[in-house]
Amino acid sequence: MIDILDVYESEILRQEFDLIIFSSGFEKRARHFFTKYKKDIVLKPNAIKLCLSFNDFTDLFDRKRNDFCFEQSGFKFLNVDDFRYGSLAKFIEAQLSQHEYSQNKLTVLIDYTVMRRYWYSEIIQYFHLLSEQGIKIDVYFVYSAGSYMGKKKHKIVDDYVLIPGFEGVGSQTKDKFGIYSLGFEPYTIISVQEWVEPSRICCIVADPGSKKGSFKECMRINKNFLATNNHELLTTPIYSIKDYCNLVLDIVKKESLKYDIVVFGGGPKPFVLGDFLCGIIRPQIANIYIKGKESDPINVEATNLRIITKISFFSSY
């Protein structure tokens, strides 16, 4: 079972962490939260510090700066691109097996700002399964909203897959109901719609979004899709994953008797995190992921908005 709570940054500074996980990448904001609070984040003795990385863009300036930042602070690097699904969870499990957490309780900090969704979806599944062993796990997820420092190019779509652990357990015989969060990649949502072929869809847009004008820009970018597909349009603030999850779960409760539910997170990363949490609560949800080449590396600078979500995992028995 899980409990979802939106919290302030000050909540993080009152914790003592057994495990912290950050990620390096070419975006300037990858190191934003850590450099701002590294003197204030309290670690337990022998706490584990992991930095996840990928193979792309290793020669870019901010990628090198991010790597250096985490290396100097004693993080253990892990190139997750070299892993198959399940290997990341096994690595974390091996690290935790050498660490004694008190009273069957584990406190974790994860900055998923530049993480690929495959990574944190696997971590969520791992903690969910670990909690069923009677271990109470509090995970603080951090997201630093950002602003593009250039014109973003569209992602090239190669294939569609169901995310492992979140494939859904629907009937496979009903018509499909699509729940799409919309962002700034209009061609991905169009291609998903053509692949899924749902009978009905609901689109969710962040309002307010990560900065002033985000909602209007998202609507402008996706206007062709919205104009050519019958849809219900809902809004919810980017800063509350709890509100987003409640919205999605209400839709699922209402429509799941008649339809198989398919979710695609094309919108802001906090909504993508929310999709995975909804998948833990309602396993019949099928969560789609688009495989393809990353857009050209457009740097992203952090804004003053940081979204903190506390997820408590605990046994259902």
Image: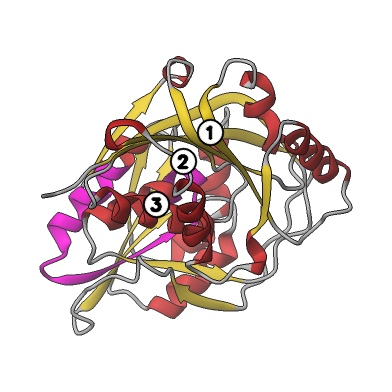
Can you tell which quarter of the image residue 56 is in? bottom right
Q: Residue at x 34, y 71 (%)?
A: 167
Image position, residue 271 (x, y; %): 42, 46
What label sits on residue 124 in the rendered view?
3
The reply to whether the magenta stretch includes residue 56 is: no
Q: Which residue is mark 1?
A: 47
Q: Amino acid at mark 3?
A: Ile
In the image: residue 154, left or right of residue 258: right
Q: Which residue is mark 2?
A: 99
Q: Who comes first in sequence, dot 3 or dot 2?
A: 2
**Magenta region, residue range:** 245-272
The reply to whether the magenta stretch includes residue 249 is: yes
Q: Tag 2, which secondary structure?
A: loop
Badge 3 crowding class, 10 Å Cα cut-off, few under 14, some 14 to 19, many 20 or more, is many
Q: Residue at x 39, y 52 (%)?
A: 124
Q: Nearer the viewer, residue 159 or 122?
A: 122
Badge 2 crowding class, 10 Å Cα cut-off, few under 14, some 14 to 19, many 20 or more, is some
Q: Who comes first in sequence, dot 2 or dot 1?
A: 1
Q: Who comes first in sequence, dot 1 or dot 3?
A: 1
Q: Tag 1, which secondary structure?
A: strand
Q: Residue at x 36, y 67 (%)?
A: 165
Image position, residue 26 (x, y; %): 77, 47
Can you tell which quarter of the image residue 206 is in? top left
